[in-house]
Image (tube, coloured by chain):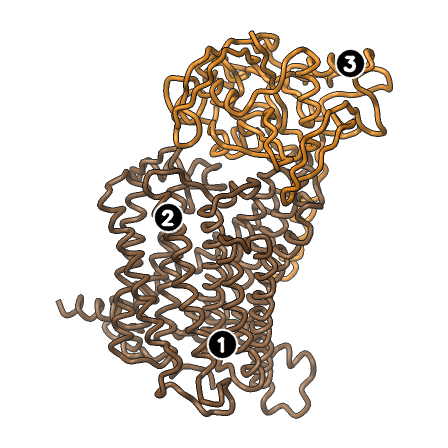
Chain colours: A brown, B orange
Amino acid sequence: MQFMIDRFNYLFKSTKGLILVAIAMIAIVTAVFGMLSGPMADFGVRDVVVRVLGMKLVESEREGRIIILYHAIAMAVIAIETYMITGLIKMKETLKTWINALITVGYLCVMIFGLTFAYWGHAWPFHGLFIFGLSLIFFAGCALVYGLWPWRKEYHIQDPEYSHTRGGIDMERMAFFAMAVTTLISSMFGAIPGSYYGNGFETFLAENIIRSPEKTTLQYSVIGHLHIMLALIAIAITLIIGRWLGFKGILHKIAMPLMILGTIVLNLGVWGVVTPLEPVAHMIIYVGATPSMLAALMLVIFGWDKLIREGIAGIKKPTFFQKIGALLHDPLRFGPLWQMVFMNFTVSGVGIFMAVRLDAVIRLWSARDERIELTGHWHALSAIIATIILLYYGDMTGLRGKVRNWFGWAIIILSDIALASVTIYELKRLGISEATQQPLVNTLMLLMDFGLAMLLVVLAMLMIWRLVDLFRKKGRWSEEISQDDLMAEVKK
Amino acid sequence: MKRTLWIVSLLLFLAACTPVDLNAPVPTFDIGVDPNAWVTIPSGSFFSGQEATPTMIDYDYQIMVTDVTVAQYVAFLNQALAAGKIKMAGDTVVGYYPGDVYHGVKHEVRIDPGDYILVPLSDPASPYTFDSTTFTARSGWENHPMANVSWFGAWTYCGYYGGRLPTELEWEKAARGSQDDRPFPWGNEIARNNANYYTSRDPFENMSSFGSRTTPVGFYNGKTYDGYATVSSASPYGLFDMAGNVWQWTGNVYPGQSDRILRGGSKDSYDMDLRVWVRNSAIPTYFSPDVGFRCVRNP
């Protein structure tokens, strides 16, 4: 019995255990539900999975199922970020416990009951529990906002290395706070239309109505919601990585106000789509995105500079290649920042191109070709965020030596191969006609599938190691159970 | 290790750049479905859209049993060209369209009265040839759906023969029937031999070279062709290819939207896009090897 209690305490009461559970849940969901579409459907795997697992898939409910699936994964990601925030940012222990408990029960309800409802027939109490889970996560968010409250005296700082106001308000804490508050508000942009559409009215995916000339306010709300929530998840992970890498100095002082400004303006722009400001909402969004991305750029400059300095310490006149070697020495610390840079090619660059050349190029394609671009674009951002989380987790879980290198580089290289292929696939119509595309498509699909499948294999290996570790008396888990203060592991 | 990586990269690059033989031989089969046939859809209600909303169409109309074929369209081009109803303009065949009312909505393209492209002349993916005087269907493609045709090309064809393009609702009723809310014209499930869609493994497809190609109209009629058994997949009203093969232009012109709506999914669509309520759209000058049409007319 003690065996079970110890493991339960690790998995559901310690920060690192909670993160491990959430990653494992996402891995399982991704592995199972990823087999229902794309090449897995082509190969006939979907039919086998549906039959073996006894799923009940009604054609007209596909969009609704996918919405629940997206939420199931997204809530677990939000939970992971929340665990990281409560582990990295000072707040009262009881509050941390409440936040983690609420969000854990919340995302597990969303995932278990939501997916059961969506894929295994409609037991309506499960739908209720799905909504209950989402509500718990909202309450956890409220508690997080309270915990992050930056005006509380005990959290004021005077350290000149970190961005703060004259009065001592910690601007980094303020950035986390702004992210959390706007996330709560933005969630309502999904909850309100969701409560309407979820009550037996029509269900739709945003990418399928993108060309409708007149969208309803609730449709705009849904489109805004999905964009801003993903952007906020990205902002949160940027702040988390900054804290983990010990972001400080002059760049920190510039970046934090920029991040706060960017977060608020970006949100105002997105919220504006449901107001008469809709015609200029995109302009406000661009204005908001720019400082946020500049802040991320400053983190990258700081982080890479720090890695190089650490790597060449002791070398009198380091050469260029020694500096590059130092930068690439530790893939788990280099990787998250590189992925943020890479994101500009696969997500931001594509998005800007789309916005600038929408009428001249994209709208000359069929809506389905535009849909491929849209869905690829945000799948790529989601995948990049996931890889950043995994890289941080790899460090957190204590990977060392060759395993650390192999794990880190595998995630970076495999995901970048897959995502670069996705990007070319999305934009293929720029250079190749439908009649002649097949060889290119085949190659790109092969690269995508190889990259993503191998990434899942790497993740599976990590999970199996952690599973086996749980059966050891003095396994890694027994050390992690008391390592709730992630700040203690921040690279000074 | 490094050498292996380089070799693999080079092979992948070469594989990606392999040219596609658009003149690859096409199998020919006796399908036994008459592309000149029409069927009357009686007035009455049906279930429209994903949410199966009861919807009334209070008039009878006739719709083609199959998509317009290459042979039919080529005959039209030759007749209409000789009659001076359409003309050549550079690398395209054009026809007159009286224009849309412009509403100035964001992203709306102005479509003024004038000549617009019906079909391109030199696109290698087109299923016909032109020898400076006469259009001819490429051998083996005569009974395939006419593709690479713009909305203007479809609109002009139907009008030339006294018909018109179906509205979205007319199209959907013809595809779904009026008895139930089935997602596919033939019922609730889709199998690979129900329709021509992406990786449906029909005899016309080769995913390692030219990819998916159109199947002859009415191909999925329950017959077996050289060992390939199809399932009879007509709609309740007896229409073929209302899911897959080629997207079909519909006739609605919506205020503020220059895009025209396409229905039915195609040889290049995943099965989800073959559901009867799924909409695609494109500007009316758009043409593609997976876009065709059929016409309706008053009884």
Q: Residue at 35% x, 74% y: name it.
A: A86
- Tag nearer the camera, 3 or 2: 2
- Say if mark 3 contacts mark 2, CB within 8 Å: no
Q: Residue at 58% x, 74% y: name it.
A: A300
* Amino acid type, callout 3: Ala
* Amino acid type, callout 1: Gly
Specify whether B227 is left or right of B148. left
What crowding class fits label 2: few (fewer than 14 Cα within 10 Å), some (14-19), or many (20 or more)?
Answer: some
Q: Chain of mark 3?
A: B
Q: Secondary structure at mark 3?
A: helix
| Mark 2 and mark 1 on one chain | yes
Q: Secondary structure at mark 1?
A: helix
* Amino acid type, callout 2: Gly
Instruction: Find residue A423 and report its horizontal and vertical position in percent.
Output: 61, 52
Of A270 and B30, which appears nearest the observer?
A: A270
Q: Dot 2 corresponds to which residue?
A: A194
| Mark 1 and mark 3 on one chain | no
What crowding class fits label 3: few (fewer than 14 Cα within 10 Å), some (14-19), or many (20 or more)?
Answer: some
**Which quarter of the picture shows residue A432?**
top right
Q: Is residue B4 visible?
A: no
- Tag nearer the camera, 1 or 3: 3
Tally of marks: 3
Q: Dot 1 corresponds to which residue?
A: A242
Q: Is residue A24 visible?
A: yes
Instruction: Find residue A19 and report its horizontal and vertical position in percent.
Output: 34, 67
Q: Secondary structure at mark 2?
A: helix
Q: Dot 3 corresponds to which residue?
A: B80
- Say if mark 2 contacts mark 1, CB within 8 Å: no
